[in-house]
Each structure stands twice: as C-alpha cells, then as structure tokens.
Image (spheres, coloured by chain):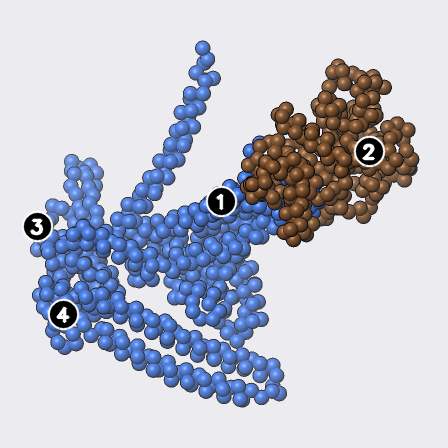
Amino acid sequence: MTRFSERGDAAIWLTGTGLGISLLMIAGMIAIILVNGLGFFWPRPIERITLDDGTVLMGEIVAREGIPRPGTSDHLRQFRIQMKLGNRDLSGADFRWIDERAILRRERPEDALYIERREYGPFIGAAARLTDGEREVASGSEAVWQALAPLVAKAGRDRARIRRLERDAIGGVNYQIERERLRLRAIELESRRRPDRDFTAERAAIERRTAALQARYADLEQELAGAVEEAARTRVTLVTAGGEEKELATLDIFRACPANRLTTAGRARVYASRLWEFVSGDPRESNTEGGIFPAIFGTVMMVLIMSGLAVPFGVLAALYLREYARQGVLVRMVRVAVNNLAGVPSIVFGVFGLGFFVYLVGGTIDQVFYAERLPAPTFGTGGILWASLTLGLLTVPVVIVAAEEALAAVPRSMREASLATGATKFQTILRVVLPAAAPGILTGLILAMARGAGEVAPLMITGVVKLAPDLPVDGFFPFLHLDRKFMHLGFHIYDVGFQSPNVEAAKPMVYATSILLLLVVLLLNLTAIIVRNRLRRKYQTSAF
Amino acid sequence: MAHTTAESEGPRLRLRTDVEFARPRRGQADASPAVELRGVNLFYGRNQALFDISMDIGAKRVTAFIGPSGCGKSTLLRCLNRMNDLIDDVTIEGAIRVQGQDIYARGADVIEVRRRVGMVFQKSNPLPKSIYENVVYGLRIAGIRAKAVLDEACERSLRGAALWDEVKDRLHQSGLSLSGGQQQRLCIARAIAVEPEIVLMDEPCSALDPIATSKIEELIDEIKSTYTLVIVTHNLQQAARVSDRTAFFWLGRLVEYSDTAELFTKPKEKHTEDYITGRFG
C-alpha cells in the first residue's frame, strides 16, 4: 500500500482549496459590488417617523444595525436605523441615525414624493401648490401630483433645448470668437517679428467679424434667457415632514416619484430610467448624482488610443528582438530589461509622462504651433493624448513580452515551408509568422488593456480631471481634441468615494461606477477575445 | 545591437581557394551533374558535423542519402538550399555548386537558390491557408498576380503531386484539413509549383503510414524525369526502391557513394555492409 504522503490525495485537496478560495473571493467581491451598486437605483418606500420628542422625519431607510455598547448586557441588542432624509438645503444633513427606541410611530404616507433635482440632493416631502407665474394651477398634494408629472417630462425636454442652445449655438459662436481672438494675437506676434509689413487690413477684417459674432452672441444670450425664463415659470411648492415649505422651479426637477404608491412595474420603470441616466447622462452635484457618461467615454477612448499606440510599437519591437536580432547576451539583457519595465510602478511612469510628454513635448508643441494661445497651454498641460501615451509606455512591455512569446511559438516548420519556396524573411514574417502569431499578440493586447483600463495613478497627473466640461470628441473642427482633459471611471471612483463632501450620498455611486469600470474592461476584453478566437480558428496550426 | 541583415543571415563562410572542381574519382557518373560538392565541412559552433564531403549529384535522377541518425545526411541536404542559414552559429567551408553556380559565393542570391532548389520536409508543414493558397504560395511571393497563371500552376502542381483528383472540389478548404499523406503531397505540390530544378526531400515518408508512403514513392518515380531529386531516408528498402544512386554517411563522413544496385549488393566498405545488413544503425 502506498503511503499517504506519496499518494496525490493531499495535493488534490490543497490545489482544490487554492482554487476554491480564489473563486470565492472573486465571487464575493463581484456580489458585493453588484448588490450595492445596482440596488442603489431601486426606489425604496418612504417612511414618516415620529420621534418621542415630537420631531417628524420622512425619508428612506437605508441601513439598520445593532448599537455597540461593549460591557453592558444590551450590547448589540438594541438597533438603530439610518435614514436618508434629503432636503439638504433646509436641514443641512441629509442622513441621520435614529435609535429605534425613540420612535413613537412609523407610517408610509401615500402622498410622499421623492424628487431628484438639480441642486442639494433629493427632496423628500409632499406637494402643496403648483403655480404658473402668478397664477395658481393646482393645490393639494393629489392635484399637484397629477399636474406635476407631465411638467417634469416637459422639464426634461426644456433642459435639452437649453443645453443645445448653450452648448451648440452659444458654444459655437464662442468658439469662433476665440478663433478670431487667436488670429488677432497671431497677427500681433507676426507684426512684432516683421515690423515692415502692414497688417491693418487683416486686423480690420478680424474686428469686423468679431463684432458680427458678438452681435450674434448677444442675440443668442437673449434667446437663452427667454427660454430659461419661459421654462422656469411653472413652480411647485413642496412641504417637508416638519412643515417647512420649499419652492422649486419644475425646470430643476429631474425625476419625481410617489415612492409609496408605485407598483412593482412602476418601480422597475423608475429603476430603468435612473440606470439609463447613470450610464448616459452628465454628472451633477459634484459627481455624486447624475450620470457618468463622460467618464465611460473617456475611459474607452483612452484605452483605445493607448492600444492603438502600444500594440504596433510592441509588435515591431518584438519582431526585431525575436526575428532579426542576433540572439546573444545583449538581446537577453534587453529582454530582462523589458520584463522588468513591465513591473515598474505606474506612478513612476506617470511622473515621467508629466515631465517628458506634458512639459517637454507638449511645451515645445505649444511654443512652435500654438504660440498665439500662450500663456494658456494647449498641449503643454495634461490631456487625453499624454495620458494615453503614458499608459502606452506602461503597457508596451506587456505587449512586447506577449508578442515575443507568440512569435516564438510559431513553429519553425512553418517558417521553413515559406522560406523553402523562395520567400524572403520579410515575406515570411508578413504572410506566415505574423498571421500565425496574431492570436498571441491579441492576448498581449488583452493583458495591456486590462492593465491600462484599471490604472489611475499615472492618469491623475497626466490629464484626468474630476469634471471635464467637454468630451474629447465634438462637432467643432478638428472634431478630435486630443489636448483636452478627460474623465476616467477609475479616477471617478476615487474622487466620488473619497474626495466628495457628502460621502454617505456618494457611497452607492462608488459601487455603481465600479460595476461600470468592470463592465467596460470586460467588454473591451471580450471583443479582443472574440477576435482572437476567430483568428485562432483561421490560422490554427497542424494538429500534429 | 548585433543583428543580421534581411537576407544574408548566413553562416560564416570561410572561403577556400584550394578547392578545385575537378571530378572526384569516386561516384563519377554524369556528364553534367546538377550539384557539385567540394570539400564541404560544416560546424555547429565548434562541433564539426560534416567532414570534407565531395560528391556530384546527377541531374534528373534520384539520389538517396542513407545512414544512421546524426550522421549528417539531413544537415548536408539542408546545405543544398542554404536552409542551414536559419541556424545561428553555423560555419560552412568548401564549395557547393548548383548547375555550375556556387551558391555560397559572396553575393549569391539565397532567394534565387531556394527558388531553384525546392524542399519537402520530414513533417508535412502546410501553411495555415487554403489548399489553393498553399500551392500558389511560392508564385504569389514571386509577385505573380494573374489568376489564370495561378490557377494553371495550381492544377499542374497538384496533378504533378498526384493530389488533384482528391482535392479539386475543395481547393478553398484549409490545407490542414487534409490527411497526413495528402498534406505531404500538398507540400510536394507547393515545392514543384515554382518549377525548381532540384527537389530536396528530408525523410518525406517518416511520418506516414505504408499506403501513403507507397503513394509518395510512386510520385517520386513519376517526377524524377522532370526534377533532380535528393532524398534523405532512414528506410533502406525505400532507398533501394526509389533511388538511382545512394550515398552512405557515417559520423559526418561520406563513406560510400555509388549506384544503388551496387551499393546494396556489393558494398565496397565494411561500414556500409554492416549498416545495410542491419549490424548497427
């Protein structure tokens, strides 16, 4: 009989346990993120609570926990609840812990409204009056709610219209005025260099155009003011549980729901609407509310630019190292260096990117091409191009290592087959080696993307900002603005979760943003994996 | 960084001026040999693998290289189309002429050499492309784009490799979908598609079953009127069956080289006799 230590049983258990623990940790992490992140958008019932000191509070109950009283007999026996009260503008704090023993009465009033608005977080209370200008349209909570619902929908359309006016029309004119100003500045710089030439005619033309643009700007301003005034005419007066009144323009209301009257389908609709806003909207309230579309866009775009830079360079370098360089001590040293480069902490790359790309390269570009904009930097400050380049630098070693392995794995017999028919080395590489190595190279891309998408540290100093007013892609020439700063999901998590003034309100956003970051990485990887499998099927090598 | 240029990644050549292209006494048969080797020494690093090989290989004949494993017969074969260039740290001395042209001369065009001297490998190695693309690969890289020319060459080569009837309806399937024997014939088709003068075969049947082997042997018999064939084999019966002349190598030296019938029936050397009678090897 074989001794136990010689049989493999223990090894099976040991290896199985290792795998099990890893899976458990991953599953647990994903479950926590999913529950906390996705649960956040589900509309919860609103409770009105009367305390023994006569205070009346209304809000969502978000948590319940035992009260720690170490040493006494009721340690963790008594409970307290955390309520989200909203109404930050009136009461100052929108979360409050309440000892359950102090509660006299709990009820769920039918007319409770949960209103998401532009400022100060949600309002929780009941409706009292609806006015259109001076005229009162409805009063009493039921009548106001009936009249309010269509007005909220209209507010969404109004906001979109105002936004178009602001961003497209006024933004466009602004952009042109800025261009004229830069032209003028360029002429000034030019005339300083060549005092003999006469620039009067050009100057006059610019001034004429600027005046026309400014007139147009004034018109648009007026149009905008009119639109805002028109849309803000309907106002609703709300009343809190404590009896305080608050008047709100319907234009500022994003969503209103009678939380206690919703059916399950109604809740699902609110849920879907909130989720959609989260994915497709712009952030509000210093990122603690609204959507994170700019961050998704920035992340994806940065990863794509980074891959577009890192993969070609990495593959070229790997080709030289593996195919052309004479394998010797030097090549081995380079290989070790590349492997070590892949392990350099990312912040080091960030500092390098800031010093080299932003200050040196960007600064030089500004002096040569954008002299008229100085001292305001164009490329001489962090931007999506520099951030992508820095991350590209960070991921190039990963690509090189993977591509080298892929090239080495192409069987020699395949190269010989090509060479023996009279192909040059270059033809062999192009037609046989690279296609056969493509799946392995894509593996490198996947690893690089996974690493790049999750980096935050180097981005913080090379171009990521808390709130970018414009996407790096828009309708103004040259459409792709690589010099712009951008938002990033990873940085968003850090910023919302740990730099926000209202941590309690931002907590669910952290989880929801984490889900999206995971999802973005997953989707990017999945795309690459599908492409890789397709290539693998196409170029699969002989079975024996 | 030390690197090799695109095509001259060759072995280091020590040119010998004392090599004369006079006929060697032994193994003399042809009026105009396809390949002439004179005093070929080959080193892997410091290990010498071939010792002073001199021989002529007759045109439009089948020449077999036999000998125990590690005797250098494949190495010598790979010298004939400069496939050894792919290995770092190989040094070749001596001279090899193909159709009178020294293929290791300074400035010799490796690509041209390989186009003239095709090769079929021990392990069938179809490219991961369609059957059609495999066959016309050599033509495509030579820059031929005309579809009619490619189609014609494809059919001619596949017929030449006795594979046409089996694959004519699925030319655009992957070459890897064929059986082992078919793959090897596909490789032969690929080699002859560029119309080489010489085809080198490095143990072409060692991975095949007897039926596939006999097909390849029939094929060799058919194409020997068109091409000069050099075949390395471990299978003595095969050498006896298909070749006109046989060379026996042992420990990197050419021991005996004569007409196949003579070498197998009346070997002059003791080593040859021991090997073909199965006393070692």
Secondary structure of residue under mark 4: strand
Q: Are marks 4 and 2 in contact (CB under 8 Å)?
A: no
Secondary structure of residue under mark 1: helix
Q: Residue at x 40, y 28 (%)?
A: A16
Q: Amino acid at mark 3?
A: Arg
Q: Residues within 10 Å of mark 2 (few under 14, many from 20)?
A: many
Q: Residue at x 8, y 49 (%)?
A: A104
Q: Position of residue A201 (x, y in %)?
A: 53, 89
Q: Residue at x 41, y 82 (%)?
A: A213
Disc with the residue nearer the chain's start (3 vs 4): 3
Disc 3/disc 4 C-alpha distance (Å) = 30 Å
Q: Chain B is which colour?
A: brown
Badge number at residue B57:
2
Q: Same subunit under labels 3 and 4?
A: yes
Instruction: Compare residues B62 and A337 and report the one nearer the observer.
Output: B62
Question: The disc numbered 2 marks a residue on which chain?
Answer: B
Q: Amino acid at mark 1?
A: Arg
Residue A460 visible to the viewer:
no
Question: The disc numbered 1 marks a residue on which chain?
Answer: A
Q: Position of residue A34 (x, y in %)?
A: 31, 46
